[in-house]
Structure formats: structure tokens, C-alpha cells
Amino acid sequence: MKRIKAVWAAPVVLALAAGAGISIAASGKSGSSGESPETATAIFAGGCFWCTESDFEHVTGVIEAVSGYTAGDEKHPSYRDVSAGRTGHTEAVKVIYDPKKVSYSKLLDVYWHSIDPTVENRQFCDSGTQYRTGIYYQGKEQEIEAKASLTALENSGKFEKIYTEVQPLGEFYPAEDYHQNYYKVNPVRYKYYRYRCGRDQRLQEIWGKDAGRY
């Protein structure tokens, strides 16, 4: 999947002081596509959705993260077909959050520090287009902030190339029930998988103390 190049520029603050890592704060309101007037939603793909769901549900202000599939062509895809790479979808999560407690900009910051943006069509031990990374925006405000965050990261010089795609959201399909809250329902298996996959080890290599950034 070819990376979508950022073309928007919003006012951004990029802190690259020694030991401070990369911090992105875009101006404007949070994304406004929500489940109710009190909540908003954001869609991210960060490799295995069990892990991405867990990462976001540890963020203050996030109400729930729902594992699912997006950015594909087939309607109502199954895990069997997505995992085989037959539908074009990527594993993603819908983050439902309270914009009074956490901003879309903050969620973007958490997202970048929870993935490896330097690899194409894979994350950690999982490979295939279904594990590509992506930010799927809803509305103009999210579009501006998402593209500005990518531009800031590109301009930081930290990475030679970034493969994370930034695209408008199409259909998001919730995954099967047995995938939801997997890290809570199957904590031993989840922790074993995450460790053996080397996710946190690689994030530490890339981001240091800023890895995760909850």
C-alpha cells in the first residue's frame, strides 16, 4: 500500500529537545464524529488490533476501543478473510472518547508512539497488508490534524521514510465478538503474544521513554 503524502499544514508545535522525544500539538477542535453529542470517534490501524485496543483503552478520556476492519473493498469482511489478506482491509480500532477529557491531537500523539511507522505492510511479528498502519480521518478538522501530525513527524528527520497511510474513513466493520477486549478476557495469552511479538521491545528502540505515551 503506497503511503499517502501529507499536503495539509496546520499550526503545529514540534518539540525535539534532547530526551523529550517528539510531541505534536495541532490547533483547532477535536474531531467531531461521535456516538453522541458527548463523545467523538477516531479510527486508527496499528497492527494487531488486540494491542491497539489495549493501548488506547489505557488513555484517560477514552471510553472504549472497538476492534474491527477498515480501508478494504469487501462488505462485512470476516476475520478469516481479512487475516488471509483477501479483502484489502487492515486491522483497526474505533476509539470512542470524551473530547472534554482528551483531544484528537493527543490521540494522534499516543498513536504515533504506539506503532513502528518505518515498515511497510507489517507491524512487529505480523506481516501482510492487513497489518499496515493508518489514520482514517472523519471530517475536515480531523483531516487537518492527522495530516499535520504526519508532516511534523516527516519534518523531524527522525525517520528516513514513513509508511503510515492517512486517508478518509470508509466503512468500519466491528470484528467478531471473540476479538473484543481480548487483552481483558484472555490476559495470559495476550501478554504472551505481545511479548513474543516483540512489540514493546521495538517501541522502546524507536521511541525510548516516550513509547506508548499514555
Image (cartoon, rainbow, N blue to C red):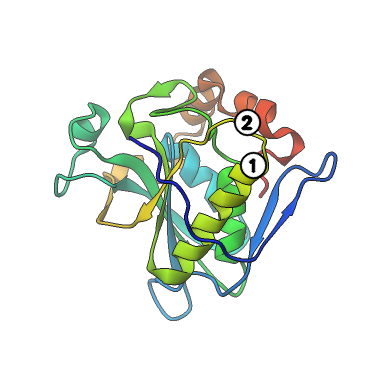
Q: Position of residue 103 (x, y in %)?
A: 59, 66
Residue found at the very far left of the displayed protein: 75
Residue found at the very far bottom of the displayed protein: 37
Vertical position of residue 160 compared to residue 137: above or below: above
Q: Residue 61 lies in what quarter of the image?
A: bottom right
* Amino acid type for the residue under numbered disc 2: Leu
Which residue is under mark 1? 212
Number of the label disc, if any, that sits on residue 203: 2
Q: Give me the residue at 48% from left, 42% from top.
A: 52
Q: Is residue 71 left or right of residue 48?
A: left
Q: Are marks 2 and 1 in contact (CB under 8 Å)?
A: yes
Whether residue 58 is visible, yes or no, is no
Q: Give me the residue at 45% from left, 34% from top.
A: 186
SS class of the residue under badge 1?
loop
* Amino acid type for the residue under numbered disc 1: Gly
Q: Mark 1: give few (<14), some (14-19) or many (20+) Cα within 10 Å.
A: many
Vertical position of residue 6 compared to residue 102: above or below: above
SS class of the residue under badge 2?
helix
Q: Position of residue 53 (x, y in %)?
A: 47, 46
Vertical position of residue 128 compared to residue 19: above or below: above
